[in-house]
Image: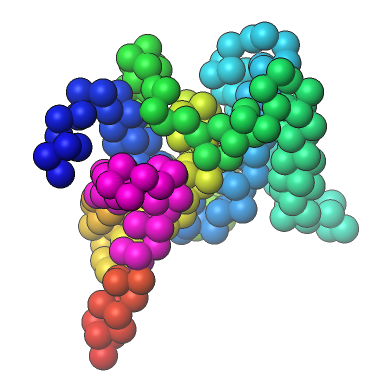
Amino acid sequence: MTDFLINLEFFKYSIACLVLMALVCSFLSVYIVLKRIVFVSVAVTQISSAGIAIAFIAGLNPTLISLLFTFLGVAIFSIRFTERRLSNECMIGIAFVVSSAASILLVSKSAKGIHEIDDLLYGNILAATPFQIYIMIGIIACVFIAHFLFYKEFAAVTLDFEMARTSGINARFWELMLYLTIGAAISIGMRTSGNLLITTFLIIPAANGLLIANRMKNVFIIAVTVGIISALTGFYLSYYFDLPISPCIVATLFAILCLTLPFRFFKLH
């Protein structure tokens, strides 16, 4: 621990990036799990990866292109297709596999090749810069302000889309806005946190909250707390045992989830 604290100055931007991503993704994970759009979030991360891959090839700004592709993806996914032979799940699945293949094919033609594919999957959190942190803070602040001001609308379209629509809420618009906030969170973290870690943050923290709490407010609190604690613990474990950062954080999240399951069992009995 002493050695880790001595090197804390070197890790400060990485830790700040992790905490910010854990904060926003864990918060949004509650909406994702409750709305049952986990596969959408997975597909969007792959689309974001494809955008970054194109930016690598074209020499463009990866964050900007990733944001553009992500917003395009969530806009398409928010459309409720009426064609019965091709369900929304089918369209999302197609987008997932095509964008995954495109990311690998595009990056394989770049100078770095396999190393950039690793960065897309696992991220390069140690390369986080102050500029990236400032961009993340700005976008995350906008996400939280939007959810604070319009919590009623976001909660309504998450819990019951049809009920929200019949009650006079513009459900399609607010569902699109929800998807866009999720897309913004994904795109700003892809370059540093990677596909694997962001996807995990968008799923497991909410599962912990929903297993323990019954009120929405408490679910959000637990999800965010678990996300941040797991990020910090996983980062320290990766340093102590000299292991990759993202898998360590994922393992920590899963370990906490496993500890949560018995709690839920005893709560029910």
Of all residues, the one furthest to the bottom in this rendering is 269
Q: How is the protein colored in the picture? A: rainbow
Q: Quadrant of residue 27?
A: top left
Indicate yes or no whether the magenta region holds residue 94.
no
Q: Is residue 241 left or right of residue 169?
A: left
Of all residues, the one furthest to the top in this rendering is 59
Q: In the rendered view of the protein, which quadrant contains the N terminus?
A: top left
Residue at screen point 42% across, 53% down = 250
Of all residues, the one furthest to the left in this rendering is 2
Taking depth in this image into account, of 45 and 241 the one nearest to the observer is 241
Q: Is 19 rendered above or below residue 221? A: above
Q: Is 67 rendered above or below residue 238? A: above
Residue 83: % across, % down: 84, 52
Q: Quadrant of residue 150?
A: top left
Residue at screen point 51% across, 55% down = 35
Q: Is 3 rendered above or below residue 61? A: below
Taking depth in this image into account, of 259 and 127 the one nearest to the observer is 127
Taking depth in this image into account, of 242 and 171 the one nearest to the observer is 242
Of all residues, the one furthest to the right in this rendering is 85
Q: In the rendered view of the protein, which quadrant contains the C terminus?
A: bottom left
Residue 107: % across, % down: 72, 27
Residue 216: % across, % down: 30, 57
Q: Which residues are magenta?
A: 228-257
Residue 199: % across, % down: 51, 47
Residue at screen point 63% across, 24% down = 52
